[in-house]
Amino acid sequence: MEGDLAYIGAGLAGMGTGIAALGVGNVAANFLAGALRNPSAAASQTATLFIGIAFAEALGIFSFLVALLLMFAV
């Protein structure tokens, strides 16, 4: 019974990777919308774009690691 609960918890933690993918898409979509409104300012905002993508992707990697820990270490 305890092993089954670990797999359920790992599945729930694994959902964070999909949510992180939605976050990356949201960051990129908002950047593209802003760049289309003001193309001259887009070049100065690319560093902010990459920082936002990195933070969103880091959350996905952390949730993936939690899922692996729940499956194999607990």
Image (cartoon, rainbow, N blue to C red):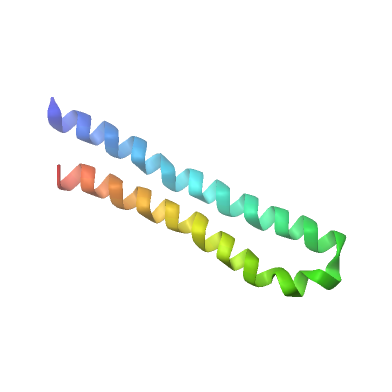
- Rendering quarter of residue 31: bottom right
Which residue sits at x=15%, y=47%? 73
Q: Using the image, determine if residue 40 lies above or below residue 31.
A: below
- Rendering quarter of residue 35: bottom right
Q: In this view, does 4 lie to the left or right of 52?
A: left
Which residue sits at x=63%, y=71%? 47
Q: Using the image, determine if residue 11 lies above or below residue 30.
A: above
Which residue sits at x=74%, y=74%? 44
Where's residue 60, x and y in %?
A: 43, 52
Query: For the N terminus, which image quadrant?
Result: top left
Q: Using the image, determine if residue 42 lies above or below residue 67.
A: below
Where's residue 41, x and y in %?
A: 81, 70
Q: Using the image, determine if residue 66 lies above or below residue 46.
A: above
Where's residue 43, x and y in %?
A: 75, 74
Query: For the C terminus, which image quadrant?
Result: top left
Q: Is residue 39 left or right of residue 21?
A: right
Residue projecting furthest to the top: 1
Count of numbered labels shown in the rendering: 0
